[in-house]
Image: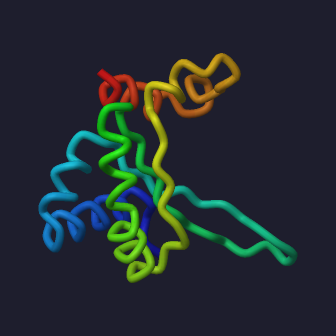
Amino acid sequence: MIAEDVLAKEFTRVVTDYYPKVGELLDGCHVKVITCFWGRPARRLQYIGIYCPGEILPYVQAQKEILREVADNMGLVQVVCMNAKRLLRDPKSKLKDNDPRLWLELQIVST
């Protein structure tokens, strides 16, 4: 089984190789593979989470069909784009406690 961070780097590499303009957009974002379990019996599902600054988010969402196609070819279920700054400012978010490294990376992305 491929590790999530390796899969995220491979996703970014494939997008950059085949769609250079979309790859430039992903340079300013944090790409992460997220694993969840759904249903009975629980099935393991993986999807791509793209954390973007608010200024880039509309441009990334405009290219979502290309991103979904690449994710589907890699065996991933979906692509989800999120505003990094909004996630960091959410008062109910426990991201800083649960995943401090991701929290710091999102700080860098959102500036």
Rendered view: 95 above or below 41:
above
Indicate the position of residue 28 as horizontal and vertical percent values.
24, 40
| Way the structure is coloured | rainbow
Tally of numbered discs: 0
Name the residue rendered at 35%, 56% in the picture.
Answer: 62
Indicate the position of residue 101 as horizontal and vertical percent values.
44, 31
Name the residue rendered at 56%, 23% in the picture.
Answer: 96
Q: Quadrant of the C terminus?
A: top left
Which residue extends farthest right?
40
Instruction: Answer with the quarter of the image where residue 93 lies.
Output: top right
Instruction: Answer with the quarter of the image where residue 3 lies.
Output: bottom left
Q: Nearer the viewer, residue 64 or 103?
A: 64
Rendered view: 99 above or below 33:
above
Q: Nearer the viewer, residue 86 or 107?
A: 86
Instruction: Answer with the quarter of the image where residue 29 lies.
Output: top left
Name the residue rendered at 37%, 50% in the picture.
Answer: 31
Rendered view: 77 above or below 35:
below
Rendered view: 74 above or below 109:
below
Name the residue rendered at 17%, 68% in the picture.
Answer: 19
Indicate the position of residue 41 as horizontal and vertical percent values.
84, 77
Indicate the position of residue 94 as horizontal and vertical percent values.
65, 26
